[in-house]
Structure formats: structure tokens, C-alpha cells
Amino acid sequence: MSANPVYLNKQIALEDAELSAEAILVRDTLIQMGLETPMIDTGLSADQKYERIRDLMADVVETLGLDLTDDSLAETPHRIAKMYVHEIFSGLDYSKFPKIALIDNKMGANEMVKIREIDLTSTCEHHFVTIDGVAKVAYIPKDKIIGLSKINRIVRFFGQRPQVQERLTRQILVALQALLGTEDVAVSIDATHYCVKSRGVMDSNSQTSTTALGGCFKQNIHTRAEFLNP
């Protein structure tokens, strides 16, 4: 699968000196596999993005017929711009990639490590509406072991982007495979999409489940079953 040429030509021009080795490894692996979120280099700093989004959102709010002189609405463009740049879309910035703690597997651990019920909040890239769910992640240690909280942080990082759930699941899988140096990683996500719940068909009960399996989780039916079962 080929990488996104627009992303390759523009986003790689970022100063890699500002990024950790782990962030560069994950970013480059996702690009190589064609799994990176479609992005372009705007050339704008975080402050410039904030200012531009704030001004554009003021136009949106006024176009809807809302009165920005009202004290309840006056700060809405500011709040949205701050939320987009520094909060719910902060995962677009690899300088925010979690600091990763990897240790040598000196104890020879070779059984499944599984973390369940990882809180996940993301945003549907089609409508910019909330995705709310939980993730489950497992791996079989090889040469390295990762700090458990770092798995949660990686899930959160990729969740803080406009996303489709299928890509999100694969991004978490590939990031952990690259960092841990093993294919033996598995990820599953169960989530409610508010673009389905609050608009369109307005189905408040349906959930979407996605799974990404690597190495023995894909090849061994028993290992797969152990991961998928509660």
C-alpha cells in the first residue's frame, strides 16, 4: 500500500528535531503503510491555527443567525478554536506524541498482556461529531515491555484526531508493533458514533466494533479467542 504523496511531500518537512524518536518511528511507519491520517502542511503555528479557526467560527455562528454580542455566545468561537487546536484534535501534532517508557524484557515475559476498558473519545471526520467508546489492547512481549499507562496514552493520542474507526484501530495496532518490535499485537474498539445517534438515522442503541490483529493473534485461533473474550 503506497503512502500519501501529499503528506510525504509536505508534512515530512516539519523539523524532526522537535519530535521524539518514537514519534518519528510511528509517523514514518504509518506513512509507509498508507495508514496515516490525511494531512497537509499548512505552515501555520498552533497560535495561528487558533486565530484563524476562531475568526471562521465567528462567521459560522453569525451565519446561523446567532447573536455573538450575547454574553452566552460571545466566547463560543474562542472556545471552539481552543478545543480544536489544543484538545480534541491535538493528536494531529506529533510533538504531542506520548513519551514512551520501554524496558528490556529481562524477566522473559512471554504471555499475553491485555488492557481492557480503555476510555476512548474521538471525533468522526465526516461530521466532526463525537465518537465515544472503549478500546482493548493486548500484546505478547518480545524484547521490550511498554509501561502500561503508555498504551492508554497512545490510544488517546490517535483518538484526538478526526477519525474513522477502522483507521483508528489500525493506527493503534501499527504504532505498538513499531514501538515494541513485534507483530504480536491486537486492538479492538467498541464505540457509539454520535453522527449515527444524534443525526441522520438517529439510532441511539447501535455500536460499532472494529478489530485489528497481528502476528499470533491472527494466526492462532486460541490466542485470538483469549484476546476477544472478556
Image (spheres, helix red, strand yellow):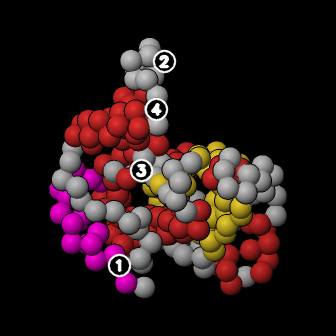
- For marks 2 and 4, the one nearer the N-term is 4
Q: Crowdedness of circle 3 by 10 Å Cα count: few (<14), some, many (20+)?
A: many
The span from disc 1 to disc 2 (Cα, nearest Å) is 45 Å
**Which secondary structure is most common in the magenta stretch?**
helix
Residue drawn at x 33%, y 69% is 28
Per the image, the residue denoted by label 1 is 3
For the point 41% across and 38% down, the residue is 63
Label 2 sits on residue? 72
Residue at label 3? 91
- Would residue 81 be found to the left or right of residue 168 on screen? left
Task: State the quadrant of the C terminus.
Answer: bottom right
- Give coordinates of residue 151: x percent, y percent: 55, 52
Question: Magenta stretch containing residue 90, yes or no?
Answer: no
Magenta residues (range): 2-20
Q: Residue at x 77, y 53 (%)?
A: 203
Q: Name the residue under label 4.
A: 65
Q: What element carries label 2?
A: loop
Q: How far is the residue under mark 4 from the one under mark 3?
A: 32 Å
Mark 1 touching mark 4, by CB under 8 A? no
Count residues near mark 2 (Cα–Cα under 10 Å), then give few for <14, some for 14-19, many for 20+: few
Q: Using the image, determine if residue 83 lies above or below residue 20.
A: above
Q: Nearer the viewer, mark 2 or mark 3?
A: 2
How far apart, in angstroms, are the residues tagged by discs 2 and 4? Answer: 14 Å
